[in-house]
Amino acid sequence: MRLDVVTIFPEYLEPLNVSLVGKARARGQLDVRVHDLRAWTHDRHNTVDDTPYGGGPGMVMKPEPWGEALDSIMASGEAEGLVKPTLIVPTPSGRPFTQALAVELAEHPWLVFAPARYEGIDRRVIEEYGELLEVHEVSIGDYVLAGGEAAVLVITEAVARLLPGVLGNAESHRDDSFAPGTMADLLEGPVYTKPPEWRGRSIPEVLISGHHGRVARWRRDEAFRRTSENRPDLIERCDPATLDKHDRAI
Ligand code: 6GU
C-alpha cells in the first residue's frame, strides 16, 4: 500500500518511522511519502493560509497549494502504475472513523491524506477532488485537535495493522474490540500474565482451570460487563441475536 501525506508539519509524521508502521515500511509492505505543502507555494513567505470570506476568527488554507500538491502526487503515482488514490481529509466535521472504515481503507492500494491546520481547507478543494476521486472526510472523535496530523497517525496505524503480513501471529486481530467474529459488538475483557500473584493480587482461578469452555464463558461475561459499563450504547444497538441467555442475566 502507498500512503502520501501532505502537511505543513512533516516532522509531526516522524512516528510513522517507529513500531508497527515503521517495521511495515522497512519490510516494503507500506510505501509512505510525507510532503511539505509549502513546497507548492510560490511567494517569499510560503503562504498557505488566508482570512475567511464572510469574516470570522482564524485562517483558512488556500486552495492553490493543495491543488498543485494533489495534482503532483497523483501524477507521481500514475507514473508508477497506480491508478487513482483515495483522498482522506481528517476534520472534526467529518464522518466518524470506525473499524469498518479502517477495514475498507485497508483494501485500497493508495491513500492520500490532506490534514489541515487552522480552520480547514477552502471547500473548493474537496469539491474539485470529490469529482475525480473517492474522498472521505473523517473525524477521529468528538473533540477538537489543532490539526489533522494526529488523526493521520491514528488512521494509518489502524489501517496498517490490517494489511496482510503486517501483524505477527502474537498480535493477531482475531479478538479485537470492534472486530467481526464471536465477540462482535463487545469490547475486550481484562487480560493477565505471570506471575500468578502480584502484590497480593491473584489471577482469576478459572484461567488456570484448564477448562476451555469455562474460560470462554468467563471471557464472554467479562467482555459483556466491561461493554455495559464503558459503552452501554454498544449493547443498546447490538443485534439481540448476538447476545445469549447468560449475557442477558448479567
Ligand atoms: Cl480528524 N481533525 C481535527 N483537527 N480535530 C479532530 C479530528 C480531526 N477528529 C476529531 N477531532
Image (cartoon, rainbow, N blue to C red):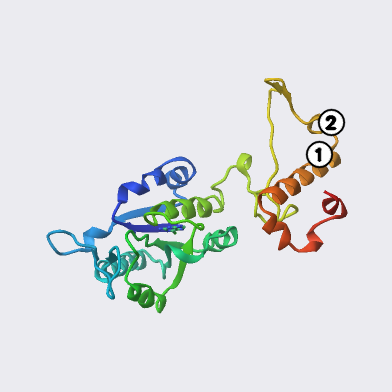
At mark 2, the secondary structure is loop
**Other residues around mark 1 within 10 Å, as few (<14) / some (14–19) / many (≥20):** some
- Above or below 240: residue 177: above
Judge from the rendering whether residue 204 lies leftward or rightward of residue 78; answer left or right. right
Q: Quadrant of ligand 1?
A: bottom left
Amino acid of disc 1: Val
Q: How many marks?
A: 2
The x and y percentages for residue 122 are 32, 71
Which residue is pictured at 81% across the width and 39% down the height?
Answer: 215
The x and y percentages for residue 41 are 20, 63
Amino acid of disc 2: Ser
Disc 2 to disc 1, how far (Cα)?
A: 8 Å
**Could you say which is closer to the camera, residue 74 or residue 126?**
126
Q: Which residue is mark 2?
A: 209
Which residue is pictured at 84% across the width and 55% down the height?
Answer: 244
At mark 1, the secondary structure is helix
Quarter residue 133 falls in: bottom left
The x and y percentages for residue 246 are 86, 50
Which residue is pictured at 39% across the width and 66% down the height?
Answer: 81
The x and y percentages for residue 77 are 36, 64
Mark 2 touching mark 1, by CB under 8 A? yes
Judge from the rendering whether residue 10 lies leftward or rightward of residue 39; answer left or right. right
| Beta carbon of the mark 1 residue lies under 8 A of ligand 1 | no
- Furthest residue toward left: 44
- Above or below 94: residue 216: above
Which residue is pictured at 69% across the width and 32% down the height?
Answer: 192
**Other residues around mark 2 within 10 Å, as few (<14) / some (14–19) / many (≥20):** few
What numbered label is drawn on residue 215? 1
Q: Residue 208, can we see it? A: yes
Quarter residue 46 falls in: bottom left
- Furthest residue toward bottom: 131
